[in-house]
Image (cartoon, grey):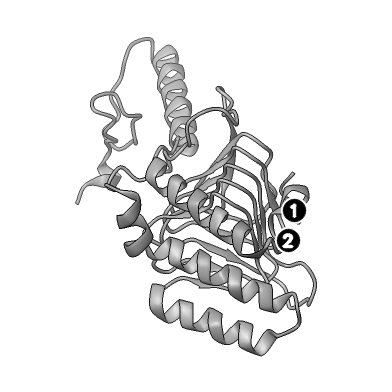
Amino acid sequence: MATQSMTAATKPRGLIGYFAMIRRDVASALERDPAARSSLEIFLLYPGLHALWIHRISHWLWIRKIRLLARWISQLARGLTGIEIHPGAQIGTGVFIDHGMGVVVGETAIIGNDVTLYHGVTLGGTSLSKGKRHPTIGDRVTIGAGAKVLGNIEIGADSRIGANAVVVKPVPENSVVIGVPGQIVKRSQPHRATDAPDLNHSSLPDIIGVTLKELLQRVDELEDQIEGHAVHHPHHIHAPIINDSWEGIDFEI
C-alpha cells in the first residue's frame, strides 16, 4: 500500500536522485496535461511542480529536525505558488498537481506515486492529536478539483475522488467516490497500474438520483396497477423521462 511505497520514496537520495525525480515529475506533467507543449515550458511555468520541488527541500530539513527553517521555506513556497504543503508531509514520485491554487496538504499526509491532485484539494486533519491525523493516498489516485479528504484514512490505489467530494472514511482500492459525504462506488472496470492515468474526475455517477428515479418509476407503476390505467398526477414529482428532466409542481419557479 501507499505507506510501504512511501518509505523508500521519501528517503534522501542526494542531488542525483533529486534531479531524477524532477525529470520524472516533468514527464508526468507532460503525460497528464494536454495543454503542455514542451518539457521546458513545464519546468519553468508549472507552479504545481515548483511547489513539489521546494517541498522536497523543506522535507529534507524537517526530517533532520531543522524545522523552523523547513517551515519558513514551505511558507515561501505557499506565497509563490498558492499551494500549501507542510514540510512533514511525505510525497512520492511522479505526483502532478494541476493548476494547484488552493491545494493544502497537512503535516502527516502521505501521498503515493503517480498521484494527481487538482486545484482546491485539501488533505486535512480532523483531530487535535499530535499523531497521524491526515490521509494516506495510494498510488495512481486522482483527486478532483475542490475535493476534501479528511482525517487519518487511507484511499486505496487506483481510486478516483470526484470533484468537490468530501471523503471522511477509508476507500478501498479501485473505487470512485462522489458526493457529500463521499459515497463509494466500486469500479466495474478496474484500473490497472499499466493503464493510462485516470483523469476523469468530472465523471460522477449520480447514485442517489438514479435510486430516486427507479423508486419513483416503481411508485408510478404500482399506482397504475391500482387505478387500472395510467393516471398523471400533476402534484406528484415524476421520474425523468425526456432529457433527464424532473417534473412536478414542486419544481415550478
| Mark carried by residue 11 | 2
Q: Which residue ends up furthest to the left in the rendered image?
A: 253
| Mark carried by residue 186 | none
> How many angstroms separate mark 2 from mark 1 (CA)?
6 Å
Local packing at callout 2 (Cα closer than 10 Å; few below 14, some 14-19, many 20+) is some
Give the side of residue 214 with respect to residue 40, left or right: right
Q: Can residue 209 be seen here? A: yes
User: What amino acid is at disc 1?
Assistant: Ala
Give the secondary structure at mark 1.
helix
Quadrant housing residue 158: top right
User: Do the residues under discs 2 and 1 have CB atoms within 8 angstroms?
Assistant: yes
Give the side of residue 31 with respect to residue 2, left or right: left
Q: Which residue does the image show at 67% across and 72% down from the upper left? A: 60
Q: Which residue does the image show at 65% across and 40% down from the upper left? A: 157
Say above or below: 70 vs 191.
Answer: below
Residue 235 percent location from the top left of the image: 30, 38
Q: Nearer the viewer, residue 24 or 127?
A: 24
Say above or below: 43 vs 60.
Answer: above
Q: Which residue does the image show at 34% across and 63% down from the upper left? A: 44
Residue 40 percent location from the top left of the image: 32, 55
Give the secondary structure at mark 2.
loop
Q: Can residue 86 be seen here? A: no
| Mark carried by residue 8 | 1
User: What amino acid is at disc 2?
Assistant: Lys
Q: Which residue ends up furthest to the bottom in the rendered image?
A: 68
Q: Nearer the viewer, residue 61 or 98?
A: 61
Which of the image's four quarters has the N terminus? Answer: top right
Give the side of residue 191 with respect to residue 171, left or right: left
Give the side of residue 113 with respect to residue 238, left or right: right
